[in-house]
Image (cartoon, helix red, strand yellow):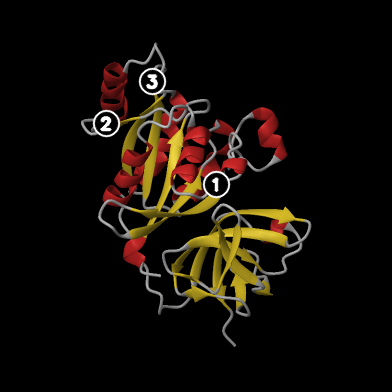
């Protein structure tokens, strides 16, 4: 996998500003969802979320996108929670990215929670580009909201994308902007393994599933790994990516984002924010 073709980005938005619908449109536009699967809020997998309409789990989805330059890119969309209660998860998710799309409701404008997450992204030196969503609403005021974003957040909005997730407007512009503005990941695949766990959950069939961003090195099935925070040692049973269905891969290398299954029985042993390294005999 050529690192120059990888883009790792997240979506920052206040709750109800249309983030999940926008994420679904990106999945559809890149052919990741079939017509039958175009259920609202596909990324919000957990049942609890469906009830509350809130994104809780940071799902990482791998999208293949052939850009206007004729090259095919791997876009890793790391969905972050928009709710104030989940700020630690947001910070871990952002640390797996190089860029972030700031989604602001074209009618409602900038909200306090948006600010907290944007400052986190700025702290992590992410490339941030603004998207005004819900541009189709009669109450949309794109010029006023652009001015708000510039004055309150300090981000240039001269090339802000005007979009409507509901109507599918601006989706291709978003994908092209991700390719053009989000830098490719750095990292050395020949260096010792270092991977960041930014999410983990328990699956009754597979045990604990960890979402990771590989910083350096390569991880693959059969590798013995150590989780630094807990000191636990495990053997990797499977690595892969969600695209959005689980796809088993031969390896995950520097710059890539995906899942790791390693026979971990309890989710507390796979702490969010933990570092995974190879066990050296």
Q: Earlier in the sequence, mark 1 or mark 2?
A: 1
Name the quadrant of the N terminus.
bottom left
- Image spot of residue 106 (x, y percent): 37, 21
150 or 233, nearer to the observer: 150
Q: Residue at x 54, y 31 (%)?
A: 84
Q: Residue at x 52, y 25 (%)?
A: 16
Is residue 45 in sight in this rendering?
yes
121 or 23, nearer to the observer: 23
Q: Is residue 71 above or below residue 122?
A: below
Circle 1 SS class? loop
Which of the 4 image quadrants contains residue 5?
Answer: bottom left
Circle 3 SS class? loop
Q: Badge 3 local density, few (<14 within 10 Å), some, or many (20+)?
A: many
120 or 262, nearer to the observer: 262
Q: Which mark is residue 121?
A: none
Q: Badge 1 local density, few (<14 within 10 Å), some, or many (20+)?
A: some
Q: Which mark is residue 33?
A: 1
Q: Earlier in the sequence, mark 3 or mark 1?
A: 1
Q: Are marks 3 and 2 in contact (CB under 8 Å)?
A: no
Circle 2 SS class? loop
Residue under numbered circle 3: 109
In the current view of this chain or complex, which residue is farthest to the bottom? 281
Q: Badge 2 local density, few (<14 within 10 Å), some, or many (20+)?
A: few
In the current view of this chain or complex, which residue is farthest to the right? 204
Q: Is residue 188 left or right of residue 78?
A: left
Residue under numbered circle 2: 154
In the current view of this chain or complex, which residue is farthest to the top? 139
């Amino acid at each position: 996998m050529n690192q120059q073709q990888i883009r790792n980005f997240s979506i920052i938005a206040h709750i109800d500003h249309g983030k999940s619908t926008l994420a679904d449109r990106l999945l559809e536009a890149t052919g990741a969802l079939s017509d039958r699967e175009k259920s609202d809020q596909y990324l919000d997998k957990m049942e609890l979320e469906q009830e509350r309409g809130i994104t809780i789990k940071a799902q990482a989805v791998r999208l293949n996108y052939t850009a206007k330059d004729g090259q095919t890119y791997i876009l890793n969309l790391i969905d972050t929670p928009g709710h104030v209660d989940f700020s630690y998860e947001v910070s871990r998710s952002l640390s797996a990215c190089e860029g972030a799309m700031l989604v602001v409701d074209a009618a409602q404008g900038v909200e306090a929670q948006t600010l907290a997450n944007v400052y986190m992204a700025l702290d992590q030196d992410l490339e941030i580009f603004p998207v005004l969503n819900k541009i189709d609403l009669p109450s949309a005021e794109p010029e006023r909201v652009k001015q708000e974003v510039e004055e309150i957040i300090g981000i240039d909005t001269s090339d802000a994308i005007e979009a409507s997730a509901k109507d599918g407007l601006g989706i291709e512009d978003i994908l092209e902007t991700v390719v053009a503005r989000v830098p490719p990941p750095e990292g050395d695949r020949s260096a010792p393994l270092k991977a960041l766990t930014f999410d983990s959950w328990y699956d009754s069939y597979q045990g604990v599933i960890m979402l990771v961003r590989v910083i350096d090195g390569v991880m693959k099935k059969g590798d013995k790994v150590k989780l630094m925070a807990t000191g636990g040692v495990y053997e990797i049973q499977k690595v892969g990516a969600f695209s959005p269905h689980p796809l088993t891969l031969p390896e995950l290398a520097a710059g890539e984002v995906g899942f790791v299954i390693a026979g971990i029985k309890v989710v507390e042993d796979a702490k969010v924010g933990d570092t995974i390294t190879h066990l050296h005999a």
